[in-house]
Amino acid sequence: MSTSLGFDRPIRAVVIGAGGGIGAALVQRLMADPGVAHVSACARQPLASGIGHAQHALDITDEPSIAAVASTVGAVDLVLVATGLLHGPGIQPEKTWRSIDPTALMELYRVNAVGPMLVAKHFLPLLPRQGRSLFAAISAKVGSIEDNRLGGWYGYRAAKAALNQLLKTAAIELVRTRPDAVVAALHPGTVTTRLSEPFRGGVSAESLVTPDISANNLLTVLGQLGPADSGGLFAWSGQRLPY
Ligand SMILES: NC(=O)c1ccc[n+]([C@@H]2O[C@H](COP(=O)([O-])OP(=O)(O)OC[C@H]3O[C@@H](n4cnc5c(N)ncnc54)[C@H](OP(=O)(O)O)[C@@H]3O)[C@@H](O)[C@H]2O)c1
């Protein structure tokens, strides 16, 4: 059996952040994939029925909740982390260093970098020791240091850059025990979700995609990645982005 995700066996998948725009779309796409036998949908808020074959309460800032879900789901072949924070109460993307707020900065790191790494800590050991497996977290192109031309968004950029570094480091460690595994950071494009809603004014209609299109793009990219790509940052188009 060969699935569009590149596996030669039916797989078990976990999506963290399944209540988000892209996360929910990833769950729906995976459930429609005949190569995916089981999808666990994880979110901090209750999910609508039908999202995932199983649902789990998980807050990525609460390590015990991550550990509890990891011990429940058991073996897994594909882990997708689709959580993220750009704006919220007390948090707005900074246009200038004058707006830097330590509390907001720490919260952006906590959700965008530390949380996904805690998921890696508890879920990477669940991947098979032999054969293909995938662990991907949604990052953002603005987390690329080399690609930073516009400035601004200090906290979100820095937190995503930290996420990229954490994933790269985990990829180096993981290959020692799971040589066929792939760890990837993904850029989903500009997607019509709550996260991007206040910031889409200057984005052309052609550059915007729905969560469903983005999820399809991301799964297509993942299906094309192999162990040699592990640790990289990849755009929705498949292009490898510089760190
Ligand atoms: N949309 C874009 O244009 C775009 C562009 C580049 C990168 N991204 C990245 O894509 C990913 C998905 O974002 P999205 O666009 O789908 O936005 P979204 O709809 O706002 O989804 C983000 C999800 O993260 C969840 N979350 C936040 N903190 C959490 C926590 N402590 N524990 C568990 N879940 C938590 C939110 O949960 P609640 O529902 O409970 O709030 C929400 O479901 C993010 O990493 C984002 O940075 C998005």
Image: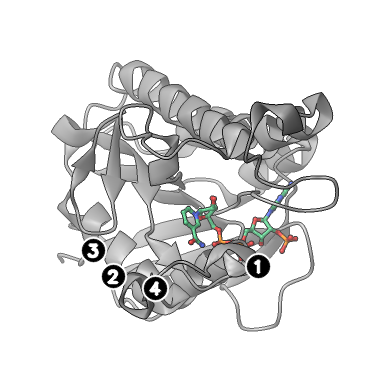
Q: What residue type is labelled 4?
A: Leu
Along the polypeptide, which appears first: circle 3 or circle 2?
2
Q: Relative to 17, is 89 on the left or the right? A: right
Q: Quadrant of the N terminus?
A: bottom left
Pointer 2 residue: 35
| Residue 85 position (above or below residue 98) | below
Q: Mark 4–mark 3 contact, CB under 8 Å?
A: no
Pointer 3 residue: 220
Q: Which amino acid does label 3 sit on?
A: Thr
Pointer 4 residue: 208
Q: Where is residue 70 in the image (x, y as percent from the top left)?
A: 62, 42
Pointer 1 residue: 19
Label 3 crowd bin: few (<14), some (14–19), many (20+), radius 10 Å: some
Residue, x 32% and y 31% (percent of image)? 129
**Does the rendering let one see residue 10?**
no
Q: Mark 4 vs mark 3: give the one in front.
A: 4
Along the polypeptide, which appears first: circle 1 or circle 4?
1
Q: Distance between the residues labelled 1 and 3?
A: 21 Å
Q: Distance between the residues labelled 4 and 2?
A: 29 Å
Judging from the image, what secondary structure is the residue with disc 2 in?
loop
Q: Where is residue 39 in the image (x, y as percent from the top left)?
A: 50, 66
Along the polypeptide, which appears first: circle 4 or circle 3?
4
Q: What residue type is labelled 2?
A: Gly
Q: Distance between the residues labelled 2 and 1?
A: 23 Å
Q: Mark 3 vs mark 2: give the one in front.
A: 3
